[in-house]
Each structure stands twice: as structure tokens, then as C-alpha cells.
Amino acid sequence: MIKKYHFGKPYNTEAVILPVPLATDTLPYFEVSAEKGLSFKLKLEKSDAVYGLGEAMRGINKRGYIYNSFCSDDPNHTEATRSLYGAHNFIVIEMGEKVFGAFFDTPSTLTFDVCYTAFDTLRITCENENMAVYIIDGDSIYDIVKEFRNAIGRSYIPPMWAFGYTQSRWSYIDKADVRRIAKGYRDLGIPLDAIYLDIDYMERYKDFTVNEENFGNLPEFVEEMKADGIRLVPIIDAGVKIEEGYDVYEEGIRNNYFCSDKDNKPFKACVWPGMTHFPDFLNPQVRTWFGAKYKILTDMGIEGFWNDMNEPAIFFSQNSVDETHRKIKKMADEEFSVDKFNELKFYIGSRQNCNEDYSAFYHNTPEGRFCHKDVHNLYGYNMTRSAGEALDKIEPSKRHLLFSRASYIGMHRYGGIWTGDNHSWWSHILNEIKVLPSLNMCGFLYVGADLGGFGCDTSRDLLLRWLSLGIFTPLMRNHAAAGTREQECFCFENPEDFKHIIDLRYRLIPYLYSEFMKASLENEMMFKPLAFEFPKDEVARHTEDQLLIGNELMIAPVYTQNALGRYVYLPEDMTAVRMTGGELSYTEMHKGHHFVEIAENEVVFFIRAGKAIPLCKAAKCVEDLDLDTIELVGTGKEYLLYTDDGFSKDYENPANFKTLKK
Ligand code: GLC
């Protein structure tokens, strides 16, 4: 059961789309204080758990740390980081036998102090006194998640080709470069479904333009790649370059479509294109206008997009520059010291994405004029909504690939997310494992991280291990930052090791696609913590580096350097499936603790007792998969397969479900 409570005059974020009447009782569970903004307090016992919060660092059980819900562009995130790119304010609290969910629906910053300041206290605070809070009661975590997901609407469904392996880099600089990548994969027979175009495909980083010198006649090039089973996926950034004669800029100015400053002038700040204006995505008219621009690229044959820099990221504003100059000038007249040096260093670093800039511009929304800092968390959501709604109009019967960096709950209806700028660090593999189920709880099913790591140089062993997790994530993309070592699979020694792992992904696609579709259609989770499935098993409850995928599989990825393998906990008997040199072998294993040896070029995963999964033959791209080659493996006798044409939207058609029997 879901109930809604209002505090002050909440902003309608449109995260919840199910009509939920206002409750007449007072908010249960929490002690509420409205002294400074709002604060919700709840006492917890030592063994109680708090799950959720979507994209966040630390454990699957969020206890013991403090998190700020504030979409943040922080490429150097570590365990100490309190905010990531998404703001996902949904939690499920397990208190002894009792379990309930709570969604704190506000576009402002929220702090979740999950037993960090006081061991026994969960405290949620917000400076803004306006908020809607939804409380969901149910018998299990799964029930609560399902009820919540039902209220926020069906998760975005990508085309089937978007389940293929995809390659990215900032940036493939021209057509020859893209052809080189395609050839690198095709020559070695490593499957590949898409190549991403980062900002350099544009003319001076202007959205919806194409650099004619390097990517001239893009439609023909799109066709050429598609003929080889490879789609091109361009990036779209939130900021619009200020440049006379650039139609997007001029139309935006003419129609007052950009966020404005306190004097009602378009707010200016610097991002990749230099000085930009930010479309006011919180205004429905602006969403319609900006979204319609995607047609420029769909008319060229493009079928997928990634929306970026939409927290929005701000490198600096003129105000920041002026302040910095003032500070430096003042310091020049004083004696320089270590303290001054550190002060200056900190000051300059803190100018990027600073509160002063986020406080300096405004949105004209259907609910009135709002300062950006009060509605910050809705920006990326509404940029992607703008694209999603437009694509539905541009090509109504077709699915498009769409994912975003910044997000808020509600955006899950329009696109997926990738988890932003990670690093080629082992700890970021583990972090991905932990974030996947939390994202699913909040509605985000089409998710994935930059495999191999975005920042700093990757290493062969790290990439192999990360891919061994990535073959299970719906979005499977290898992406790297400018200036880092090349990390396409064909750049490394013994590339057949990469081929075998990626081939396995393609063999698993009938399963992954079926489980994804079931999760989306039924409002369920695809990635599940062991704690949710085996709540009475104390070891399972505390195992956070293994996940269940769908109803049949369990994974236990290796995420440490130099590992011979890893300890795996089996909460029940399972069949271990081992891929070595492209061949699969099967071992029955008993419930309990095991050390499982897994070489860098091997993958091991587990099929639950009495269950079977479909495996098909690998192919160079998703469209070439032959479902007639499916065999069922595992101890079970049947499997409910979901298949469709992979493009259209007739999801509910009963013909899409087929029971396969051994
Ligand atoms: C941001 C994105 C990254 C992209 C880069 C250049 O850092 O997160 O994925 O490659 O911008 O566009």
C-alpha cells in the first residue's frame, strides 16, 4: 500500500505518475521536525538495514555512512564521495520483521545520514520545507519495490541491439578512426553492436551539428556502419554554445528558452563548447523544442543517443572568473604562505560546479519561477525526458537507445543511465556491483558503467575482469577519457581472451533480454542482492559482492588484482558454469562457502537449483543471433523466453513469451 504525505507546498516532480490520494493520518515511522527545513528521524536496531538510494557509493545496505542527494559531476569519486550523478531518494527500511519503503520527493538537496552520526539513528534532512513523502508498506522488500515502481511507471526499454557490446572513447576523431575501431573488432571476430561518437563529432561542440570536415556525409557513413551491424551513437550535451548564426542558440534566445539570471538575462557559463546557455528543461515548451532537434540526427539514420553534462556541469561562470581574479589580485599584495597556497588551490578547485553558480540562475516552470539550486536534481531528468518524449513522436513505433548521466527518479521512464566518469580502479568494479540493485530499486534497469574505467590508464587484467561483470549488465560499454591509453579489446595481447568473454555475452543475450523485459513489464528488479532473496540466511544478508540476475542466475565477479579466484557463498545448491577458452563446462556445487578459482580469461557464473537458462550461439552483432541455436542449460526443465523483433513496442503481446522445454 502506498500513501502520500505533504509538507509545505511540494514541487510536482512528476516522479510518481500513479494518482495517490493525500493521506489523512500523520506520517508514520518517522519523527518529523520542521525547525530548519525538514528533518525525519527514525531509531533503528543494530540488525536493521536500509537499502536503496540508487547511484551512491558504499554498501548495498547503506548503514554507516552519509549521502547527499545532489546530482554531481565528480569524476574522482571515491568511497568518501557523498553525491554522484543521480539523485534517487527512495529507501527501503528493514526493521526486524517489519519492512517499509519511503520516497522523499523533492528536487532540492537531501541528506541521508544513515546511522553515521548516531549509530542507531537514520536522519533525513532537507533545507527546503516543501516535500512530498510516500510511504509504502508491504510484506517483503520485493513487494515494496514493485509497488513503488508501479507508482513511478514502467522502466525505459531500449532496442535489442543495445544489449550488444559497444565501444566508446573520447573521441574517435573522424570516419577513418571509427572504421579502424570497427575493423579492429571485426577482424578478430569480437562481437560489436555500436560505436559512440563523443563531442568531437560536432562542429565546435555545438549540439545537433556535425563536423563536416571529419564526419562529412554522416548519413552515408551511418549506413556503411549499419551494413556491418554497427550503430553510431552520438553524445548530446546540455549546454548550448553561444554563437551568432547557430540556429539552436538563436532560436533559444528568440523564444526565451534558456535559464535566466536574476535580471532575466540568459545565464551564461562555460562547458566544453566555451560559453553556453542552458535550455530550461523544466519548462515543457522548451522540452518540446529541444527534443525536436534530435530529429536532425535521426533523419541521418541515428538510432541512439547519450545525454551528458546534464547535472548541469558548469566549469565556471564569469562571476567565478571575476571572483578568482579578485582573490588572486588581493593575494598578490600579501605575503604568500603555505596556508595562502592551499587556500588558493582549494578555492580554484571549488569553482567548478559551485553553489554560487547554481544559485545564480532560474527556471520558469509550470509551478512558477525557481532558483536552480532549489530544483537542481530535476535538470538531467528533464533533458532526457525532452529527448525521450520527442523520439516517441519522431519515430513512434520504434525504440531508441537513450541514456543519461544525471538523473532523478521519473527519468527511468525515458532512458537508462551510465554511472558517469569512473576510473580504471579495481574499487570501481566493486562499486558497480553494489550500485546495480540499488538502481533497479529506483526504476533504472538499463544501466552500466564505463567498462575498463574512464579516467586513467586501464590494464589488461582489470579490463578482462571488468568485462566479466559487464557481460551481465544491460548497457555494456567500454569507454575511456581523452589522453588515456587505448582500451579497445583488440589493443591488448591475446585478444582471443576478450573475444571469448564477449562471445559469452552474446550467448547470454536471450536470457538477459528476457529477464530485462520481465523486470520492466512486471516492475521487478533484474539485479537482486542476496539479502533480498534469502532474508533468513545471515551470510546471504551480509554478502554484497555477489548478485542474483533475474530468476535463474547468480554472479560473483572478481574485483581484485592478482586474484587466483575468489570466495563465493552459495545460499543454495547451484550449477557452476565455467567458460574457459570459449568452451563451457558445468559443475554441481553445494550450498555453503567455496573458493572458486577463476583465471583472468575465464568467467564463472551460477545457475540456481532447479532452474534452466537459454544459451544461443554467439554472433558478430545482436541482429545476427540465431535463436534456433538456443539450448537450455542447468538442472531445470524449462524457461520462459521473451522474444520480439527488438524494435517495436508491442511488449505485451502474449506471443512474445515462449516456454522452452528441455
Ligand atoms: C564527460 C562524460 C564523458 C565524456 C566527456 C567528453 O566527462 O562523462 O563520458 O567522454 O565528458 O564528452
Image: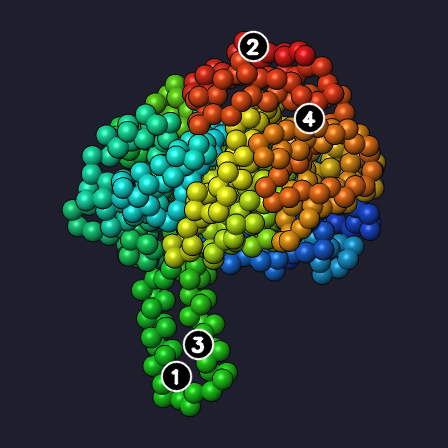
Q: Which residue is mark 4?
A: 552
Structural distance between the alpha carbons of marks 4 and 2: 22 Å
What quarter of the picture does the N terminus occupy? top right
Residue 445 visible from this viewpoint: no
Q: Which residue is mark 2?
A: 654
Q: Amino acid at mark 3?
A: Leu
Question: Which mark is first along the chain, 3 or 2?
Answer: 3
Secondary element type, mark 1: helix
**Precedes in sequence: disc 2 or disc 1:** 1
Q: Earlier in the sequence, mark 3 or mark 4?
A: 3
Which residue was labeled with disc 3? 344
* Spatial separation of the CA atoms under disc 1 and disc 4: 64 Å
Closer-to-camera residue (24/303):
303
Quarter of the C terminus within the rendering: top right
Front tag of 3 and 4: 4
Is residue 344 toward the left or the right of residue 112 in the image? left
In front: mark 2 or mark 3? 2
